[in-house]
Image (cartoon, rainbow, N blue to C red):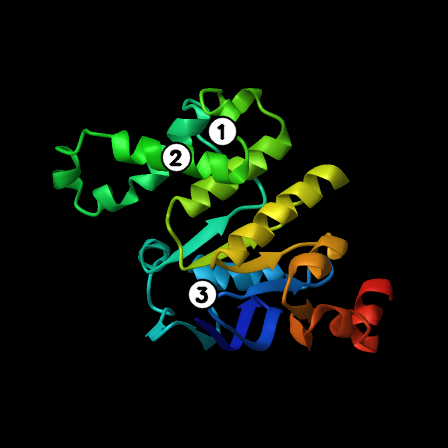
């Protein structure tokens, strides 16, 4: 589904990502891990189009994405859940998800003015909130919710795009262990139902538990790839994490 070929990113004189390559198969749950500052989020931003690589290509199925802006990549099937959640505080939880679910109506700004029926989007929002386990707060304001709920709201908003590929940037950050396990179980269930996922995450116990395969980056370079337990026993990977 996704091919990352020799991606290199330079910021001034600093090489943030250095010739990283890997492939992602349809239906996979891939963990993209590494120490802080390894280049994981930069690589994620290359995939979404907010960072332009110095070298290399990003291919989604049969389409090279390099020259496409972020909004076109999203319409081709890429969804992103951000590490720092930023819901619309003036909307309810349901309205936040329904707003995203109506993305197909905004392709033509003029035509969208005449599409005032929100019932399909509201029903889809209810379904997604139930899927991520927060349907009971549908009418609440995000401002009144704890982080655990906001993380699930962020996930529901990403799913409302009906993505072929879901990119998750540290969805477990800031959660306690019980919340982390519960959200990890939700991600595992989504993947079991066919959702292809790349997961950036520092909670290694949960990454190892739910991911099919890992790609490890350190100082911008790929240093490991393969089955989770095998990768985590690699000497280079252990050195990157433990020093």
- Find residue 160 and report its horizontal and vertical position in percent: 39, 44
- Mark 1 highlights which residue? 135
What secondary structure is marked by label 2?
Answer: helix
Query: Which residue is depicted at the point 16% across and 45% down?
Result: 108
Where is 194 relative to 221, above or below? above
Q: Give the class, few, some or many, for how many residues have Cα within 10 Å of label 1's Cα (few <14, many ≥20).
A: some
Residue at the disc numbered 3: 52
| Whether residue 125 is visible | yes
Q: Which mark sits nearer the N-terminus, 2 or 1?
A: 2
Looking at the image, residue 237 sits to the left or right of residue 73; the answer is right
Q: Which x, y percent locates residue 191?
A: 53, 57
Image quadrant assignment for residue 133: top right
Q: Position of residue 190 (x, y in %)?
A: 52, 52
**Which of the pair 179/85 is nearer the observer?**
179
Judge depth for marks 3 and 2 and give the one in front: 2
Which residue is the extreme one toward the right? 243
Marked residue nearer the N-terminal end (1 or 3): 3
Placement of 225 over or under 106, stated as above or below: below
What residue is rendered at 84% in x and 70% in y? 239
Badge 1 marks a residue whose secondary structure is: helix
Residue located beneath label 2 in the image: 125
> Which residue corresponds to the image point at 52% horizontal and 24% vertical from the top-left?
136
Mark 1 touching mark 3, by CB under 8 A? Answer: no
Q: Is residue 42 left or right of residue 236?
A: left
Residue 213 image position (x, y, % from top left): 64, 69
């Amino acid at each position: 589904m996704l091919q990352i070929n020799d991606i290199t990113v330079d910021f001034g004189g600093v090489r943030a990502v250095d010739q990283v390559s890997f492939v992602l198969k349809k239906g996979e749950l891939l963990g993209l891990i590494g120490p802080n500052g390894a280049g994981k989020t930069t690589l994620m931003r290359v995939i979404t189009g907010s960072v332009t690589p110095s070298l290399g290509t990003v291919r989604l199925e049969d389409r090279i994405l390099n020259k496409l802006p972020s909004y076109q990549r999203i319409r081709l099937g890429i969804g992103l859940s951000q590490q720092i959640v930023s819901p619309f505080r003036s909307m309810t939880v349901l309205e936040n998800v329904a707003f995203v679910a109506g993305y197909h109506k905004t392709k033509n700004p003029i035509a969208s003015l005449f599409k005032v029926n929100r019932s399909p989007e509201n029903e889809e929002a209810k379904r997604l909130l139930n899927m991520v386990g927060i349907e009971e707060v549908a009418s609440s304001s995000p401002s009144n919710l704890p982080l655990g709920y906001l993380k699930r709201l962020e996930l529901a908003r990403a799913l409302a795009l009906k993505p072929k590929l879901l990119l998750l940037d540290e969805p477990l950050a800031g959660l306690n262990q019980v919340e982390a396990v519960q959200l990890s179980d939700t991600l595992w269930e989504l993947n079991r139902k066919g959702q292809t996922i790349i997961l950036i995450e520092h909670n290694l116990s949960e990454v190892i538990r739910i991911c099919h395969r890992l790609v490890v980056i350190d100082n911008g370079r790929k240093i490991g790839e393969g089955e989770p337990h095998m990768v985590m026993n690699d000497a280079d990977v252990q050195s990157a994490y433990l020093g």
